[in-house]
Amino acid sequence: MTAPTAIRRLNAADQDFAQHLDHLLSWESVSDDAVNQRVLEIIQAVRVRGDAALVDFTRQFDGLDVASMAELILPRERLELALTRISSEQRAALEKAAERVRVYHERQKQDSWSYTEADGTVLGQKVTPLDRAGLYVPGGKASYPSSVLMNAIPAKVAGVPEVVMVVPTPRGEVNKLVLAAACIAGVDRVFTIGGAQAVAALAYGTESVPPVDKIVGPGNIYVATAKRHVFGKVGIDMIAGPSEILVVCDGQTDPDWIAMDLFSQAEHDEDAQSILVSPDAAFLDRVEQSIERLLPTLEREAIARTSLQGRGALIQVADMAQAIEVANRIAPEHLELSVENPEQYLAQIRHAGAIFMGRYTAEALGDYCAGPNHVLPTSGTARYSSPLGVYDFQKRSSIIHCSADGASELGKVASVLARGESLTAHARSAEYRIKG
Amino acid sequence: MTAPTAIRRLNAADQDFAQHLDHLLSWESVSDDAVNQRVLEIIQAVRVRGDAALVDFTRQFDGLDVASMAELILPRERLELALTRISSEQRAALEKAAERVRVYHERQKQDSWSYTEADGTVLGQKVTPLDRAGLYVPGGKASYPSSVLMNAIPAKVAGVPEVVMVVPTPRGEVNKLVLAAACIAGVDRVFTIGGAQAVAALAYGTESVPPVDKIVGPGNIYVATAKRHVFGKVGIDMIAGPSEILVVCDGQTDPDWIAMDLFSQAEHDEDAQSILVSPDAAFLDRVEQSIERLLPTLEREAIARTSLQGRGALIQVADMAQAIEVANRIAPEHLELSVENPEQYLAQIRHAGAIFMGRYTAEALGDYCAGPNHVLPTSGTARYSSPLGVYDFQKRSSIIHCSADGASELGKVASVLARGESLTAHARSAEYRIKG
């Protein structure tokens, strides 16, 4: 009996390829009834009992022996203290990353605009930042300082006056890198609460936690379910599925590099998805050998192996044109174009969260410090959605300022259309402004 | 016994004003379990049985005696025919409105951008239109040609190659103004289906209906519930609550004009909300008299009366500063600043879907033909969301192209941060690119 291979092989020329690919990509996240029910109860408790409910749930879920809400508020000084407690190398890396993220996101800022028509009528669009944004940061092992930078900096660049962060500290475990990142990113207030109760507190407010206008940041199934339920009361970012990478390679990149790029996704969690597409069958063999050889050297070998076996694939295609076709079909969160002259393919890429061009641009560089956001659309949602950005923390208001002449002319048009819809009060309101 | 007044009066100076206002604004749309269950069944049936399910549901819900899906496909010639069957006045009004909406939305188009760093690393953002957008148009009485323009034109301006419209034709009733508007707006394909089944068809596709990337447009509770359920598979626009207007008036506008502006919202439906805020108590009296006098002259008197009695209000404030405060608290869908020199207040308005400036700019002008979109955030969601726009039909992909030098420098930073998060495959992937 041979050992199971670490990763499956597919060939786009096979008759049932489309079906295999669909199956490989299929992913539906469902909150079961029990989770939904529990989350609704938690939200209701926080709405009714406020801080007292937060204290109770934090005792219960985070194993923290807290007497009052005051113990769950982290003053700004604690963030500054954390910054002095990390290594100078770590601090320099965080500051470098933050600076690059800030510079990139500055380019996303939208400005208000307006124009004046011949009759003096002014039309425009006013751009305003949100008043207050909430940032959810997971506790424990999945507590990532890079995520704090990626979520908080766009909000601050947008001009949000107050960014409120929540982060659970299960059994009192505080991640000083997370606090240091919060300090660097300019987070204004921090509460050490988590789970559905933290989402509820951000959405509805309590005596201590101010209600925010939008909640962003990753979380477990309880957090994701709570975000779904409070959506409408506040804005939310996307509900992220498992992370994915699609590498398109012409066969000329070091196979060890490509294997490690695939691992960098697979090590996230068992459901993460790493796919390599190449027109070069021999190259796929070499990458497979690299995978087999390097996998045992990974600290997170077990997770990566499960991910690759369950959801990974090496796909052989006829040529680069077919590789791009597969990429557009997948609409991946991360797309590495590990090829010569990647620019030649860029116009044909229609759907991808982020595109990593050329052999040197490892996805990991984008995850931490290249500048663009690492919060990206997953599970094919890049077909219709975008990376997290400054635009997620700004909103627009239309401006219409009709001159007397403009209102008179537009009134005639509006009157005809309103009467065509049998909305006669609309018509009469417009007709009042028509000159006699 | 005196007759009930048509609209309530509130005074911001009253101790319980904030509480009254909260109560007046409170609105939660809930799909009950029965609706949810029915919608889930319909979606499942369409996913499994495709066109056959669409034919069955259309017979059942729309009372149409159709034998096959072919009868539910409207060829483009039918749209062109409709355009010849409406009055020349209506056609001119639709074309004028479409042209103005197009010109305004052209300004919302986003372009791709990039910049090159000193070491040759290129960072950028690529903007791409959606491949295919779906537009839901209600049938029967709430079938509005203006909504067709407002939903389809931004998609076409964004560059969406294919806009697919669905519109039910209950008992065979086809609205020729809607078809004419679809023709003018450049809608590519039309299916005469509606309800949750039409939403399911757009989301998952059938033999005849192509799957789209995003579904926009208003609908009843079944449509809204179905949109919620297919969200994630496709993008959706906002789930709209009842329409609202907030008029802020300095007391110098003709009270009949203001009354009719309030009616133009109240006539939409019983749950619509019309509120007037003024520092001038005598003016509020005059508007109340206008309301009492004009209400009986409305074609849709019963609806408007119910709306004003249930959800309307005339609010007295101390001064314009307090009026603006109330406006920001409400974050209205439509805000009319019916005042002298409205520009002076614009900087202080933080939350509103659309702002109608000055005495001549009736909301109705914006509803039909001023140019900005009439699909606007309701129920206070203007705190964090925007009018429907070209940006809803475009999405962004981040571009990262590191030079060898850039990757080497960024690799060092990424390595430190990745190791700080215990993601060592990330670190090693970055380290491969560090120059030895």
Image (cartoon, coloured by chain):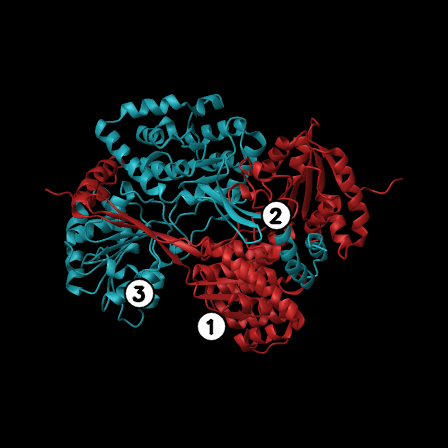
Chain colours: A cyan, B red
Say which element carries label 1: loop
For residue B21, side relative to residue A73 (left or right): right
For the residue pair A27 and B80, the one nearer the viewer reads as B80
Could you give the CA–CA distance between mark 2 and mark 1, rounded to whole angstroms?
34 Å
Badge 3 amino acid: Glu
For the residue pair B19 and B367, the one nearer the viewer reads as B367
Q: Nearer the viewer, mark 1 or mark 3?
A: 3
For the residue pair B48 and B179, the one nearer the viewer reads as B179
| Total residue callouts | 3
Residue with the mark numbered 3: A325
Say which element carries label 3: helix
Q: Nearer the viewer, mark 3 or mark 2?
A: 3
Q: Chain of mark 3?
A: A
Q: Are marks 1 and 3 on the same chain?
A: no
Q: In the image, what residue occupies the spot 78% across and 45% down?
A: B290
Q: Position of residue A53 (x, y in %)?
A: 53, 29
Q: Chain of mark 1?
A: B
Q: Which label sits on residue B29?
A: 2
Q: Which label sits on residue B207?
A: 1
Badge 1 amino acid: Glu
Q: Position of residue A322 (x, y in %)?
A: 27, 67
Q: Residues within 10 Å of mark 1 (few under 14, many from 20)?
A: few
Q: Quadrant of residue B38?
A: bottom right
User: Which residue occupies the extreme right position in the image?
Assistant: B1
